[in-house]
Amino acid sequence: MAGHSNFNSGGFNKKPNLSNYAIWNMSFGFLGIQMGFALQNANASRILQTFGANVEHLSWFWIVAPLTGMIVQPIIGHYSDKTWTRLGRRRPFFLAGALLSAIGLLLMPNAGSFTSILPALWIGAGFLMIMDASFNVAMEPFRALVADKLNSSQRTKGFSIQTVLIGVGSVFGSWLPYVLAEWVGIEKNAAVGQVPLNVILSFFIGAAFLVATIIWTVAKTSEYSPDELLAFEEASEVHHKTNIISDIISMPKTMRQLGVVQFFSWFGLFSMWVFTTPAIAQHIYKLPVSDTSSEAYNEAGNWVGIIFGVYNAISAIYAFLLPKISERIGRRQTHAFSLICGAIGLISIYFVQNHQMLIVSMVGVGMAWASILAMPYAILGGSIPPRKIGIYMGIFNFFITIPQIVNALIGGLMVKHLFDNQAIFSLVFGGVCFIIAAASVIFVDDKDDEK
């Protein structure tokens, strides 16, 4: 597959269209990555609270995730652009990332076993850092691989299929603790300071699934050689700079514009991931802020996994529609519409009194999540030179990590001092951020639309 290319009328090689099977295979590893990522998103705050973290401090512990991503992804992108091995240039990195992520998944819920070294809370935060850094090592090359392999006409489909797999993996990861507890009968309660067995087993299963799906992609996907990639470039797109700082300074205008959109999108997402469990426990289950270990609190935590699975299931379905919708109304308009739906979903949680009705709120959130995972990358792909895809995808991650870092620094303070320890208002504020992101995307230049 990597050796077959067609020539266009201008004399340059054009990337061939790939089969749907090939496109699915190149992103299949994302199924496992997102299963592990979903386990982290739905359970990390719960685990940290179990080990003694206060609600206003949760965002401070979560800061390790975007910090490691900001550091790791540009470096991985830079070196994956320049590395060529028997496995190619992207596959070695996400294979290594998968193995390290699996180790993090195995260790985090068992942080209490290491209390002879440090308090469980700090051990858990450390494993969260290891796990998220490893997820970033694995994820960035996947984004670059899709851009490497697909031509402009298939790029939206490629990122949409990736989003479908992300959604499916997230459903598995989010629902697993609930399924093990309620359907299989695994113990869902634990003594104060200990993580329930159903959560621990979920992390073990996620680690095994993550490694298996990554190996599938490594075995089933080839990569274009450096000479083939060079042949795909147009003469006007050949660049020789290799310095990360100069690449940041000369980033395309479209990337800068998307940075504003990404900032508010990911600020809102981070609020949801960090504060949904305490928000639902307080606002829906009517539990006091200090309750982090009762049976009702664990039920709330399990239900958060269910609704997170719902929004990811919706994202998987909606991702199938994104290419058709964007063909009809354009990528920017599609993204703006999706973000507005997400804003309605998050804000509506404030008005929900029955935990089952939260499923309805998650429909809009799922639409926004699908679009956030696909449309910015589809828009960006047409504005960056092929030989710089890895580094620019890594730099683009700044616009994902910086808003999370800002939120991590001030989000807990906002909950404590501005929202009177009522985490539900952090979700409402996340919805407002989605509205601002939707307004911003209309002003982004989409180079493919111009062509």
Image (cartoon, rainbow, N blue to C red):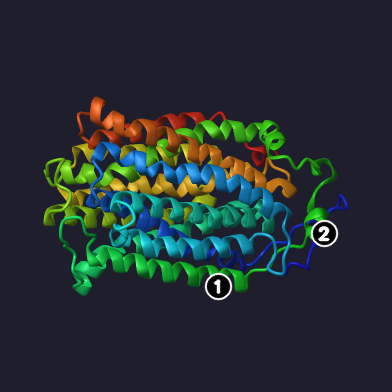
**Quick one: which residue is furthest to the front in this view?**
116
User: Horizontally, is 107 left or right of 220 in the view?
Assistant: left
Identified at 29% across, 29% down, the residue is: 414
Q: Earlier in the sequence, mark 1 or mark 2?
A: 1
User: Horizontally, is 385 left or right of 71 in the view?
Assistant: right
Identified at 49% across, 35% down, the residue is: 402
Please tell me in which quadrant of the rendered image residue 287 appears: top left
Residue 101 x %, y %: 47, 61
Residue 241 x %, y %: 78, 40
Q: Which mark is residue 227?
A: 2
Q: Residues within 10 Å of mark 1 (few under 14, many from 20)?
A: some
Q: Which mark is residue 216?
A: 1
**Quick one: which residue is furthest to the top in this view?**
418
Residue 356 appearing in the image? yes
Q: CA distance from mark 1 to mark 2?
A: 26 Å
Please tell me in which quadrant of the rendered image residue 312 appears: bottom left
Identified at 35% across, 43% down, the residue is: 61
Looking at the picture, which amino acid does disc 2 mark? Answer: Asp
Looking at the picture, which amino acid does disc 1 mark? Answer: Trp
